[in-house]
Image (cartoon, rainbow, N blue to C red):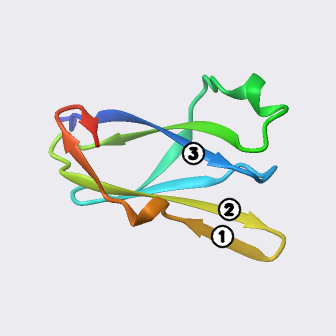
């Protein structure tokens, strides 16, 4: 049995909603990958009084990944809002993305 190595990435997403968004990544090798809320939410105390609430997500990506796009999805009432910040595609440099 073999196991693929992965790189764990941390992503911070901000929202002005009381709902917590879902986050997916569209990547060149891994395809569409769902990010999970991190157990350690470092902005939790600040979120109580903040206009923009921040949430920390983690996702595993292939170490061969060259680029990915972050997409946040938020369902409110009968609407699904999708946000892709600045239509930006992040590029991998070693273990970090820019």
Residue at figure coordinates x 22%, y 35% from the top left: 3
Q: Position of residue 41 (x, y in %)?
A: 64, 26
Look at mark 1 in the image and give the residue it sits on: 81
Disc 2 from disc 1: Cα separation: 5 Å
- Which of the 4 image quadrants contains residue 2? top left
Task: Give the secondary structure at mark 2.
Answer: strand
Q: Position of residue 57 (x, y in %)?
A: 53, 38
Look at mark 2 in the image and give the residue it sits on: 74
Dot 2 crowding, Cα within 10 Å, few <14, some 14–19, many 20+: some
Task: Give the secondary structure at mark 1.
Answer: strand
The mark that comes first in sequence, 3 or 2, is: 3
Q: Is residue 10 above or below residue 85?
A: above
Q: Is residue 40 above or below residue 57?
A: above
Foreground: disc 3 or disc 2:
3
List the single residue furthest toward the bottom: 78
Which label is found at residue 14?
A: none
Which part of the image, by quadrant, shows the N terminus? Answer: top left
Disc 3 from disc 2: Cα separation: 11 Å
Which label is found at residue 13?
A: 3
Is 7 on the left or on the right of 21, as rendered? Answer: left
Tag 2–tag 1 contact (CB < 8 Å) = yes
Task: Give the secondary structure at mark 3.
Answer: strand
Q: Position of residue 8 (x, y in %)?
A: 35, 33
- Which of the 4 image quadrants contains residue 37? top right
Q: Is residue 44 above or below residue 21?
A: above
The mark that comes first in sequence, 3 or 1, is: 3
Residue at figure coordinates x 22%, y 44% from the top left: 92
């Amino acid at each position: 049995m073999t196991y693929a190595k992965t790189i764990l990435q941390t992503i911070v997403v901000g929202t002005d909603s009381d709902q917590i968004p879902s986050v997916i990544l569209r990547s060149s090798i891994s395809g569409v990958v769902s990010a999970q809320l991190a157990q350690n939410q470092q902005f939790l105390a600040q979120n109580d009084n903040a206009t923009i609430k921040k949430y920390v997500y983690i996702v595993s990506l292939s170490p061969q990944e060259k680029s990915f796009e972050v997409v946040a999805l938020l369902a409110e009432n009968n609407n699904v809002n999708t946000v892709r910040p600045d239509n930006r595609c992040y590029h991998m440099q070693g273990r970090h993305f820019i």
